[in-house]
Amino acid sequence: MKRFLMLFALFLCFLLVFLWLRWQAEPWVQPLFKEAGIEVIKVEKELWPALRLQGIRWQNVVLDEAVISPAWWQLMTFNPAVSLKVQMGDFTQNITVSQTDAMIDVSDAKFQISLEMLKEYDPMLAMLPMDGYASLEVSDLELDAQTWIASRGHFLFDLSNLHLSLGQEASIIPDVAIDADFEQGMWHWKLSSDIFKGEGLVKQTVPIQNSTLSGKISFEKKNIPTALQMFLPVQKEQVNIQITGTVTAPIVKWL
């Protein structure tokens, strides 16, 4: 019986390999991407079960290459998921995602990008005389597939190696971290660095870009780079800022 099971398992493996080699991926996959609003120039199969996508465009985001493969750990726990690896310049972005009914689950995601690359997509960022790197880690995130409204999740956003170019010399700004957890229907965020301290809330709305923002940030004026102190409209040493508005159009008020 044991020998029979081993032979049957071997037969299944060969059958799956044969089906994979015979499967014409591009005619089957391209309509799915088109329906999702994603343009892909070329789809290739890897010998190890994976799809390599080349020439990807989604809205105003352009990627040279991405690899899609099964998330084997989730598959072994009977929770099918897809692992996506994207190359952007010198950085490799990773995300593991699955969908159940109308919900999208992101169990793990790690992104890293330079501010210089972000400026190519955001005209407002392009006006900032600042360089550095941004990284984002996401875990246990659940989203509605239609509205992108979250029902749980955790974010950790870091800004590092920041340099502000005002005047003849660049000023170094300490790393900044924003930690956010979804609790009781809202995102609770905390900001921390050697300069800033702050916390607040994000209340989700539809569309998601209109989600409302609230919070306060405080810092000591003496810790701010000299090149920036001239822009502070208050004379106090302890500076407090109130933030309102939306996540895409925040409003800053000096207290």
Image: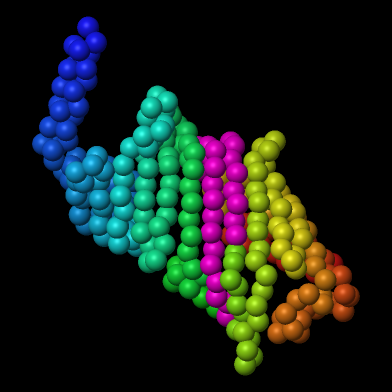
Residue 14 horizontal/vertical position (percent)? 15, 28
| Residue 30: x %, y % from top left | 22, 46
> Residue 2, relative to residue 60: is it above or below?
above
Asked if residue 154 is among those painted magenta in the image, a careful observer would answer yes
Left or right: where 64 falls relative to 154 = left
Specify how the rendered protein is coloured: rainbow
Quadrant holding the C terminus: bottom right
Q: Residue furthest bottom?
A: 168
Residue at image position (49%, 68%) is 114
Along the line of sight, the residue nearer the viewer: 201 or 116: 116
Principal SS element in the magenta part?
strand
Q: Residue 253: x and y, percent?
A: 77, 67
Residue 81 seen anywhere in this rendered image of the structure: yes
Give, as a single range, the part of the protein colored magenta: 129-158
Q: Where is residue 4 in the image (x, y as percent from the top left)?
A: 18, 11
* Quarter location, residue 76: top left
The image shows a total of numbered marks equal to 0
